[in-house]
Amino acid sequence: MSRHPSIKWAQRSDKVFITVELPDAKNVKQKLESEGKFSFSATAGADNVPYEVVLDLFDKIDVDESKSSITCRNICYLVKKAEDNWWSRLIKQEGKSPTFLKADWDKWVDEDEQDGEPGADMDMGDIDFSQLNMGGGLGDFDADEPEEEDESDTEEEIEHEHSESQAATPASPQVEIKA
């Protein structure tokens, strides 16, 4: 009897990322069908344990534009969707997902964040951030007051003081210690 490999997934409007986590997979067989069927089988481990999974994906896919990559740690699939739209889940089966199927949070992007930086299109309305007292580390910043001159020593003054102090200090005798 075969086992199910651990599978992670994420999506964009035009593609789905599917990662089969199966280190040192051998005899990898994969098949994608345009109506949305994803099939995978392989063996792994010293005992060549068989792994197999068949998923009915949520919608149709473009098999010709889909790609896969096999590495020593996992098998990655970039599955092109037949239509650009967000799926509410990876598989057609409603209810709780199988335990071996998880979200890939490293690749996950929410639908409203797909086209740019997260939060780039957020409307902040009439929020006055200066009134929030969030402690941004700027201290008592007041843009209306002119900046006072810094009274700290410049690099040249420090070097001059250092050379004067060395000239005033008598050289200490070198003591040689013999063992």
Image (spheres, rainbow, N blue to C red):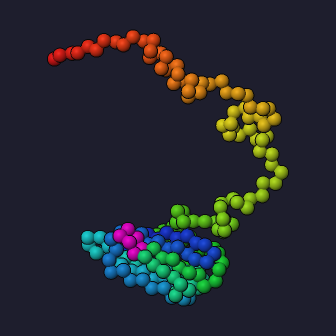
For the point 83% across and 51% down, which residue is it? 126
Q: Nearer the viewer, residue 138 or 94?
A: 138
The C terminus lies in quadrant: top left
Residue 53 visible from this viewpoint: no
Q: Which residues are magenta?
A: 70-75
Q: Nearer the viewer, residue 89 or 120?
A: 120
Query: Does 100 lie within the magenta span?
Result: no
For the point 66% across and 68% down, which residue is it? 115
Which residue ends up furthest to the left in the rendered image?
A: 179
Query: Does 73 lie within the magenta span?
Result: yes
The N terminus lies in quadrant: bottom left
Residue 158 visible from this viewpoint: yes
For the point 57% across and 65% down, which residue is it? 108
Which residue ends up furthest to the right in the rendered image?
A: 126
Give the quarter of the image for residue 132. Answer: top right
Q: Is residue 40 left or right of residue 79?
A: left
- In the rendered view, would you say 115 is above or below 136? below
Q: Is residue 63 left or right of residue 113?
A: left
Q: Is residue 148 left or right of residue 42?
A: right
Q: Is residue 102 left or right of residue 111?
A: left
Q: Nearer the viewer, residue 83 or 157?
A: 157
Picture coordinates of residue 90, whole percent (x, y): 56, 75
Picture coordinates of residue 59, whole percent (x, y): 60, 83
Picture coordinates of residue 138, whole percent (x, y): 68, 36
How many labels, in total? 0
Give the quarter of the image for residue 93. Answer: bottom right
- In the rendered view, would you say 144 is above or below 178? below
- In the rendered view, would you say 57 is above or below 128? below
Picture coordinates of residue 112, whole percent (x, y): 69, 66
For the point 45% across and 83% down, which residue is it? 39
